Image: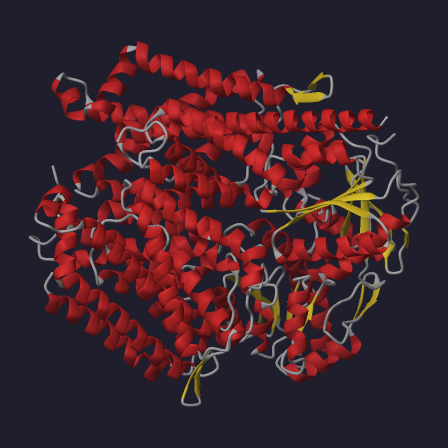
Amino acid sequence: MHFMHISEDTILLLYEIVDVIISGLTNGSVYALMAVGLTLIYGVTKAFNFAYGSFFNLGGYCAWILIGIVGLAGGYFSIFLAVVPVLFVVGYLLEKVLVAPLRKYEDWENKVMMMTLGLALFMDNLYVVVFGGRVKSLPPILEGTLEIGQLVFTYLDITIFFLSIGGILLFGWLLNNTRIGMAVKAVAQNPEGARIVGIPKERIFAATFAISTVMVGFGGILLSQKYFISPMSGGAIMVKSWVITAFGGMGSIRGGLYAAFIIGMMEAFVGWGFGMSYGMIALFILLLTTLVVRPQGLMGKS
Amino acid sequence: MMRKFALLAVTILFLAAFGGTASAADTIPVGVPLAMTGAYTGSGQDYFKGIKMAIDEINEAGGLLGKQLEIIRYDSKEFAPEVVMQGADYLCGQKKVASVHAGWAGWGQDVRAYGKYDAPFFADDGSQAAVDVFREDPKKYYNIYQLTDVGVEQAKSMFRLLMTLPYKYPNNKVVIINTDDSWGVEVGDTLEKSFKEKGWKVAKRETVPYGTNEWGAILTQIRRIKPAIIHVEIPSAQEVITFFRQFIKRPTKSILSYGWGITPREVLQNLGKDADGIVGEMPSGLPGPKAPNPAAQAWIDKYVKLYKHQIPAGSWITYTAVKAWANAVKNVGDAYNFKAVNKYLKDNGYKGLLGQIKWDKDNVLRAQPGAPIVHYQVQGGELIAIYTDPPIKPYGNYKFIVPRWIK
Amino acid sequence: MSFKRMATIMGGTFGLVAAAPLFVGDIRFIMHILIMCLIWAVVASCWDLIMGFAGIFSFGQVAFFAIGAYSSAIFSVNLGVPAVLAMLLAGLFTALIGVLVGLPCLKLAGPYVALVTFGVHMTLMPLLRGKIGMALGSGGSVGILTIPPIRIFGYSFSSANLVPTFYFALLLAMACTAVILVVIKSHWGTAFLALKDSEDFAMSLGVSAFKYKLMVFALTSFLTGVIGAFYGHYIGMISTRMLELDLFCTLMVMVVVGGIGMFPGTILGAFITVIANELLAPLGTYRAMVMGALVVILVLLLPNGVMGFWLKPAEAEAPAA
């Protein structure tokens, strides 16, 4: 009898650990989706975009307008179809109008950081003015839950998981196997060399910004279904993406992917074992120790 | 050259647009410091709606002592100490307002800042810290009025409700989750103490930072504990919505108590009927959806017509505070005789829509029949008042319904 | 820019400010704003020193400011240390933290440094609110609401008597910015410029990047800590609300307005930003939006901030390409 009792406890504990692992995987897929665009911009253009989190919410708000106000038919498929070109144009113009003119300065990297910080301040408060301070919600792309014994998954989480990983793998493939992808990589690795062989560097920079804006906006549409759209949340999303990018190595997409899952898992286990309020402290310690050993992050090139 | 010119032009434009704002002499200025930017904008907007409604009513009825009231707003941003102090100096010192109507205002910092002046200051800090500051020097802080009872008392009321519900708890285990700010900690500590005194087991107490939206790690422990009650005290919509969505995936047979966290209106806007069964409270509330008397019902109808949504926390009591102040001024006959206005407020309180309200010796509007703590349950996607406190008693014909995930 | 010109601009600004109480001495609201301007001028100048001159993209300024304010408050409230001494101790303590933060940063690239230093800012809030903070006397999420004012020979400098407090703040701000000025124009300043131009070359000449960067971390965090301590004693209360993003953004605007690496522009930047912020206050929710737009426009159109007006064409930062 006594033996039975212990084994039941052990099984419960096992279930709990499996649950925490699932929570970590969910975190990880969310983070991967958040961070991949940021690492791309930095890798290719060496510009650091602090307004990144605000573009995340831009995607969410675009979808909200299309569903709530325009009443677009065709579900999320038509929404993605409608929003992607908007985000692309916004990202392209952003680079051309606001970032490119700064490149002529010696300390342009710092100036871009300052400029994009201002842009984030502008955009976040614009959202408050236009949409109000209250959070908005999007309907889930897929309703319902999947039950496997004791374990329950929402279809939304499953969708996020597969779209996140699938999207990033597809993106990596495009980067390695298409003309434009290779041009982007060439610029990232050697901007001068790329120019000599006739790749229009300026246009690649702008295109990279545009692609990254599309990716983060896409992430925004998807994740807002789970976490809702809050006008001032851009900063928190930015910081999360920043930590993941830095931890994985800025510019390394694969590094970002690993980092997202490591951090997601760590947060789940720290929250479970020590308490949710220790998440941020643990994250910082992890980041610091990693950077002391590897200043360029997990997979970054020094 | 063009650059300099452009900058010059921008500067001049700014100065021209905002330099020359002066208030007319034949109005009575009323200060309204609320968060208009930053993380607390949402709550600031709700408080403002109540204040504005009252002031518009007074103005439409011919003003106060024959003068129109003029709202002077101040952005409390995110309540940094010097911003709170600057707000007091701006409104009371500079604009010479006759009274100040705030909502969340600084949790003690505001008492210090506005206590330097004499104009009546109404805040909804709901915090013991603010009362502790008041108690240091009640004479100096005589112009500070709190519109809701402190977190400790609200938490005791929540506990009373949970113990009063016509429901037999299957066990004596409770899980308490609260935020890491003064409100959350105050409520969490009080609940923990109350439960322990009653012989309950606090199986888990978790303090979480704002922005916690992934609850898997906590929920898995809750599922093992199988508590009879889960209390979540987070005064921010996003967190409580995500908690519920993830909880309901695989619920435990627990009464889900959200405390104040049920009141931000997007909670129900987003969850709708899914949230049916959750209980929560609103301090200094106006019970509904059917109000206790025709006047209160008319107020609810007017509010809903005006702002197109249900009554959020804070709107009604800030409205009442404006009216209470105006009533005191009318009786004193001079908006700037602060000593007399404060004395009138303190001695007489005000007869509001639910009856007499009175501030206690700490200038706190303790829970009382005229401004009760209202306990709600979500039913049919709407907040239904099931109990009022004090004294704790069922409200109207509304009944507590055992949540569907327990049946 | 020459030492003389910098000193002239600083002297002129502080001189003008010093005369202000003659006209507005009895208007509390304006006196308070002026004192805050002086405080922010120091914090922003320190930020400029570390970012604009030393080229370290540190985001820890607000954190150091809060550490200074908290440590001084804790020293004086819990240990009964006189305020002036507590301020000095707070400065030293903040400098120590600054060095500890600086150490891992020195090998890192720009955005990484920004992240690590900002990480200090991010962790400070849960730390001060949590059990560790409470044990140290941070007052948790309530904050410390009874900080004694600075007393010298029985005379107290607090928000109750603003004019003397204003002059105290002015002297403190002048001392701090004078230190920054001297540093910029000394051997250090030259070393920074050399390091910024070409770290490899400077190091080959025997300029130790490590040593100088660590020293600049220590110095800026010391000054920021002292002025943060002053802030606490002046306002009489502090809370973790200081660490919300609002202050961070405002300081950033100051640096941009003043011109990055254009000391003493940040002193002007602090005054202009605070005044603009107050003038824009009637805009309410739109204010923060306008401030954001202003940063974008300024970075694009006026890369040297207001100092652009003082620079001779030859001194203006030449585009690299």
Count of numbered tags = 0
Q: Which color mode does the image show?
A: secondary structure
Please provide percent x and percent y for residue C230: 40, 72
Q: Nearer the viewer, residue C134 or C268?
A: C134
A294 to the left or right of A259:
left
In what quadrant of the picture does the N terminus of chain A appear? top right
Residue at 76% in and 30% down: B251
Residue lying farthest to the top in this orientation = A177
- In the rendered image of this protein, does residue C219 appear above or below residue B116? above
Q: Is residue C287 visible?
A: yes
Please provide percent x and percent y for residue A166: 47, 15
Residue at 26% in and 19% down: A185
C226 to the left or right of B261:
left
Q: Quadrant of residue B149?
A: bottom right
Residue at 46% in and 29% down: A260
Q: Nearer the viewer, residue B111 or B357?
A: B111
Q: Is residue A62 visible?
A: no
- In the rendered image of this protein, does residue C267 appear above or below residue A259? below
- In the rendered image of this protein, does residue B303 appear above or below residue C184? above
Residue lying farthest to the bottom in this orientation = C154
Please provide percent x and percent y for residue C136: 54, 63
Q: Nearer the viewer, residue A251 or A20?
A: A20
In what quadrant of the picture does the C terminus of chain A appear? top left
Please provide percent x and percent y for residue B348: 79, 77
C65 to the left or right of B372:
left
